Structure formats: structure tokens, C-alpha cells
Image (cartoon, helix red, strand yellow):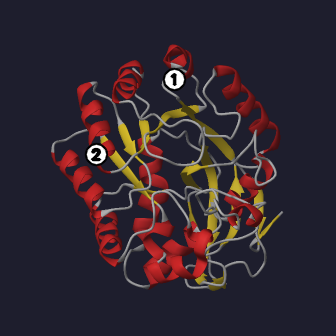
């Protein structure tokens, strides 16, 4: 088998759930899922249920737990409920912090900021080169872009999902604003038919759109309007997803790379795009440090079936279960230490 080497890939948007919801993921299982998926660096989100990362103490707790349990490198985005801006100067200096996450539209967690004056206060207070990441669409997204311009903040728009938001981001970039954007593979690959078939197991925020939105998203990925791919890895248990009011989100760390290789096989992307979307741009936008003696190796032409050899994520499922993908990580080496050999975690 002929393997091709790549750098250890970076996922800037994952939910590893520890502390607060370790029944469905923790730093051990989440980092194992990352490594199996070809990622050696991940950035964890702050909306932990019951224990959001909105104080320096909770941040230090996460750093300590990840240091003890994770098998790959883990960084963090700090969170805000709009009332913790006094902690920002302490936090943005922390080398483990890569950005500030602001939730401006409804999703999982307790950090929603709907008051525009409060949001303005957050943008004004975050006087850092590290970006503000926003969960926001439509009018909310336009407000965030205006605030970023007003206060000269770097802005990263998470999981872009609609043609309207693509246009807003494209216009901001034309004006040379400091705006970047990410996209998930479930928004690119799951169709309305898949959503109907999967039911709650395809329930995500933002919602998965139709063919027109999807075509625009692919164009934006190809022309550079969208800068990177992020899994938005959101592990929820099957029991939770079967509820009448299930949580939003799907796991993605173990399928992101394979879906991108599927896109290469379908002629939608090239090999160089994968490096741009999972390494070059994430590293540049979030100032990710080098990982010496680190690489992954895979066979881009070798197919595999999602879920065939199980999952490392605790939640144990994927909306892409049974799909044939390509380019499974056969080898993963982090700082000279072999973590995956012959496609299996060592």
C-alpha cells in the first residue's frame, strides 16, 4: 500500500464535553476520535452544559484535565455570556486560548447573547489579536460583522450554512475586513432526503439547507470565501437524540477527512485544498504553534466504510454511518510518537 504523508491536521471547532457531560465525551475519547480522524490539534468550545468556560478558573480546569487525559494537542476558545468581560484581559494572554466564542443565535448551552448593546460591549472589551468566533446568521451575522469593523476585531464565522450568509461574508472580504469563515461537512454532504431519513440524528444548528444553499457553499469553499473546514464535533448519545426535544449537533471528527477525500474523488476539490482547509488556513487564522516531528499518512485512493470498525467517540454513531469514504489515516505520529499504526490506535 502506497501511503502519502500530510501534516497533522487541525480542527478549530470541537465540543469535547468535559467537564459537565462526560457521559457522551471526554478528553480521552474525544482526542482518540480526533487522532483516528487524522487530527493532531483540536480547539475545544466553551458551552459545556452546567460548566461553561466563562471564568479563568474553569479555563484552568479544562487545561488541567486535557493535559492529563488527551492524546493529541488541545487548545480552547473562551466563552462569554456578556457579563464576564472583566476577565478578558487575563484570559486572552493565556497561550492555550485561541479565541473568544460568542453565541448570538439559539443553540445548545447557556451562553446566548441576544441583546445588541451587550454584544457591542463584548466586542469592545475583547481587545486582542485573537479572533472572536460567532455563532450567528442573517441579521445577527451582519451585526457581528459591523461590530468587528467598528472595533477592528478579527472575526471568524462558524459553520456557514446559507447562501445569504455566504454573500454577507463575501462582501465583507471585498471590503478587506478581517473576516474568516468555516464550514462543516454535514452542511455540504447531507441532503434534505438524508435529513428526512435520519430525523433527529441530522438535527443541527444552523439547519441543513437545500440543494441551492449547498451549491453556493461548495462554490464558496472552492473560491476561498470560506477559509477552512471545521467538524463542529458535537457528540450526543443515541438516547438523547431519540427524545422529543433532542439536542442539536452531530459527531464529525472521524468523518471529516474521509468526506473531503470523497469530494476530491468527485472532482469538487483537489488534494491541495485539503491541506489548505485543514492545515494552512486553520494554523494561520488561529496562530496554531508548530508540532515538530508530526505527520499523518494515508492512501487517498483506498475506500473504507464509516462505522465498519466502530467509533472512538463515546456517542458511538455518525450521520454518515455506512457511507463509503476515502483516505482513512493509516499512520499518525505526534512529536515522534506513533499514535496510529495500520489504521488502528496504538
Q: Using the image, determine if residue 222 lies above or below residue 293.
A: below
Question: How many marks overall?
Answer: 2
- Name the residue that disc number 2 marks: 139
| Vertical side of 115 occupied by 93: above or below | above
Q: CA distance from mark 2 to mark 1?
A: 28 Å
Residue marked by disc 1: 92
Q: Residue furthest front?
A: 244
Q: In the figure, 296 relative to 282: above or below?
A: below
Q: Nearer the viewer, residue 115 or 159?
A: 115
Residue name at image x 39 percent, y 30 percent: 115
Residue 185, given in percent of the width and then of the height, sits at: 49, 67
Position above or below: 113 against 341: above
Q: Earlier in the sequence, mark 2 or mark 1?
A: 1
> Tag 1's secondary structure?
loop
Q: Is residue 312 visible?
A: no
Residue at point 75%, 40% (across, down): 20
Query: For mark 2, does the 10 Å Cα neighbourhood hold few (<14), some (14 to 19), or many (20 or more) residues?
Result: few
Q: Left or right: where does residue 259 sit relative to residue 209? A: right
Q: Is residue 35 visible?
A: yes
For the C terminus, give its image quadrant. bottom right
Q: Position of residue 149 (x, y in %)?
A: 24, 32
Judge by depth and name the residue closer to the eye, 22 or 264. 22
Front residue (pair 87, 201): 201
Task: Tell me what residue is drawn at x 41 percent, y 67 percent.
Answer: 272
Quarter of the picture containing the N terminus is bottom right
Which of discs 2 and 1 lies nearer the camera? The answer is 2
Question: Viewed as shown, does residue 248 lie left or right of 192?
Answer: right
- Crowding at mark 1 (Cα within 10 Å: few <14, some 14-19, many 20+): many
Instruction: Name the quadrant containing residue 233.
Output: bottom right
Q: Are marks 2 and 1 in contact (CB under 8 Å)?
A: no
Q: Which sits in the foreground, 222 or 114?
A: 114
Amino acid at each position: 500500500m502506497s501511503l502519502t504523508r500530510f501534516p497533522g491536521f487541525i480542527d478549530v471547532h470541537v465540543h469535547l464535553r468535559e467537564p459537565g457531560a462526560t457521559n457522551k465525551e471526554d478528553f480521552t475519547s474525544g482526542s482518540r476520535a480526533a487522532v483516528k480522524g487524522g487530527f493532531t490539534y483540536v480547539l475545544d468550545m466553551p458551552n459545556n452544559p452546567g460548566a461553561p468556560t466563562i471564568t479563568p478558573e474553569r479555563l484552568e480546569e479544562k487545561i488541567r484535565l486535557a493535559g492529563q487525559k488527551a492524546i493529541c494537542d488541545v487548545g480552547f476558545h473562551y466563552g462569554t455570556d456578556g457579563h464576564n468581560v472583566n476577565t478578558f484581559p487575563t484570559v486572552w494572554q493565556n497561550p492555550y486560548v485561541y479565541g473568544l466564542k460568542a453565541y448570538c443565535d439559539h443553540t445548545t448551552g447557556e451562553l446566548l447573547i441576544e441583546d445588541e448593546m451587550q454584544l457591542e460591549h463584548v466586542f469592545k472589551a475583547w481587545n486582542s489579536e485573537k479572533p472572536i468566533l460567532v455563532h450567528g446568521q442573517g441579521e445577527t451575522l451582519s451585526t457581528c460583522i459591523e461590530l468587528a469593523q467598528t472595533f477592528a476585531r478579527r472575526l471568524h464565522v462558524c459553520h456557514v450554512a446559507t447562501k445569504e450568509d455566504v454573500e454577507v461574508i463575501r462582501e465583507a472580504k471585498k471590503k478587506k475586513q478581517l473576516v474568516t469563515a468555516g464550514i462543516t461537512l454535514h452542511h455540504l454532504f447531507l441532503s434534505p432526503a438524508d435529513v428526512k431519513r435520519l430525523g433527529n440524528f441530522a438535527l443541527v444548528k444552523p439547519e441543513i439547507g437545500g440543494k441551492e444553499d449547498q451549491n453556493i457553499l461548495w462554490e464558496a469553499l472552492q473560491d476561498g470565501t470560506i477559509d477552512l473546514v471545521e467538524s463542529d464535533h458535537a457528540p450526543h448519545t443515541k438516547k438523547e437524540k431519540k427524545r422529543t426535544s433532542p439536542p442539536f449537533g452531530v459527531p464529525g471528527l472521524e468523518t471529516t477527512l474521509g468526506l473531503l477525500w470523497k469530494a476530491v474523488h468527485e472532482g469538487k476539490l483537489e488534494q491541495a485544498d485539503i491541506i489548505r482547509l485543514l492545515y494552512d488556513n486553520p494554523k494561520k487564522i488561529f496562530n496554531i504553534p508548530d508540532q515538530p516531528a508530526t505527520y499523518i499518512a494515508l492512501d487517498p485512493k483506498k475506500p473504507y466504510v464509516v462505522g465498519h470498525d466502530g467509533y472512538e467517540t463515546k456517542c458511538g454513531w455518525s450521520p454518515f454511518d455506512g457511507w463509503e469514504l476515502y483516505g482513512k489515516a493509516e499512520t499518525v505520529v505526534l512529536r515522534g510518537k506513533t499514535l496510529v499504526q495500520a489504521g488502528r490506535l496504538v
